[in-house]
Amino acid sequence: MFSCNKSGTTDNNTSIIDSLEISSKYIQPVDSIQFLQSYNLSCSYPCGDSIAIMGYNYRTHALDIFSDSTLLNKIQLEHHGENGILGRPTAIMPITRDSIWIYDQVAFYLIDSQGKLLYKFKEDRSVFLNANYAKQTAVMGWYDNDCLLYPVDVNGRYFVEYYSLKQKKIVKEVELDGAVCNRNGKNSYGYMTYPNVSFANNKIIYNYPYESNIQTIELSTGEKQEYKAESKFTDNTINPYNGSINSVEMLEYAWNNVHFFDVAYIPQVELYVRFILDGIDVKKHKDRDSVVDARKLYVSFMDKDFNVVGEFPLKEKRYSNFHGWCVFPRGIIVYVDNLLGEAQDNLVFDILAPVLH
């Protein structure tokens, strides 16, 4: 079902974005809702004629819903019983207000806006849905108003599964290629083993955290393409990991090196967007509690052919670098939460919107 590979190119000197428009939003506390200061796992959520934000609150095991100025509601999840979601969610994806997919490393759940279970199934193979700054980020997709899309690991080979809700089974799978700099998969990159996976514009979009290259597969035809999508601020590949299987050493390796996050799509401006977290010299930064907060964060915008058309360094010591950003109608949200910056009493986030010329 796959065609021959094609290769795309990018020109880092091409720019259609003059600057970023940054607007800060402050969410006032609500007595009945104990919100977080940043949400590691969040996404946009349809709310009437507008778009809200949905974030998983690990403290309360709930989905908090807020707009750009106020907390609107929460969906309380149950731990046990017929509506129980046993584990801690690692992926959420609202399709409509009353159809929300959740994965918690135990099973896939489809719930409504009251937290009631509509459907549940388990995947026997290793699912790598996640949002982790040191490992990778992968989200779910929804195709043809029937198929839930998600990535799995089958003995070191990576696939996207098509699970049909109507047929209640996997009806198709598509294999993902290895990284361009690690095609045979023999090199180790510490915790950065799995690809980032996202879905937009009838495409599977994936990239590996240790290189800038982006790969796509057309859902309808299986056509593959590759794009360099290089950064002008950071290294575009990193050296393989040659240390021991030691969690401390592997984490320091991740801190020392650049990390390319997943690719998202902003429909109103028809641009793709990706965050890049630069490495830091761990030996010069002695405070391990704030080492992630001290790293530099960049945002890169790409056109429909993944040409980089604007790339910007973000203000240091301001944002949470632990992921959690999500797409809003014409920009992308980043939570203001950094140990090295000003302390925040409320939930604060910035909306970064590209200014086009």
Image (spheres, rainbow, N blue to C red):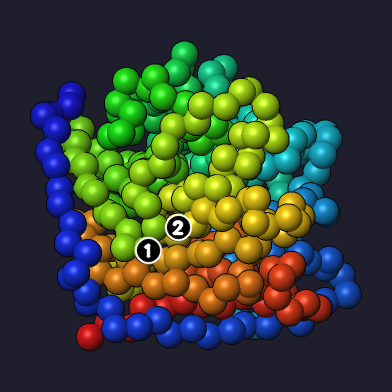
Residue shown at 29%/45% (left/top)? Answer: 213
Secondary structure under badge 2? strand
Give the percent coordinates (x, y) of residue 296. Answer: 53, 64
From the viewer's perspective, is the residue at label 1 or at label 2 nearer? 1
Residue shown at 30%/71% (left/top)? Answer: 310
Mark 1 touches mark 2? (CB < 8 Å): yes
Q: Is residue 73 above or below residue 120?
A: below
Q: Amino acid at mark 2?
A: Ile
Query: Along the horizontal axis of the image, is 38 left or right of 6?
Result: right
Q: Which residue is mark 2?
A: 276
Give the percent coordinates (x, y) of residue 283. Answer: 65, 50
Q: Which residue is mark 1?
A: 233
Quadrant in the rendering for residue 19: bottom left
Q: Amino acid at mark 1?
A: Phe
First in sequence: mark 1 vs mark 2: 1
Give the percent coordinates (x, y) of residue 204. Answer: 32, 41
Depth check: give the residue in front, 165 or 173: 173
- Which residue is situated farthest in the front direction here? 284
Secondary structure under badge 1? loop
Give the percent coordinates (x, y) of residue 337. Answer: 69, 69
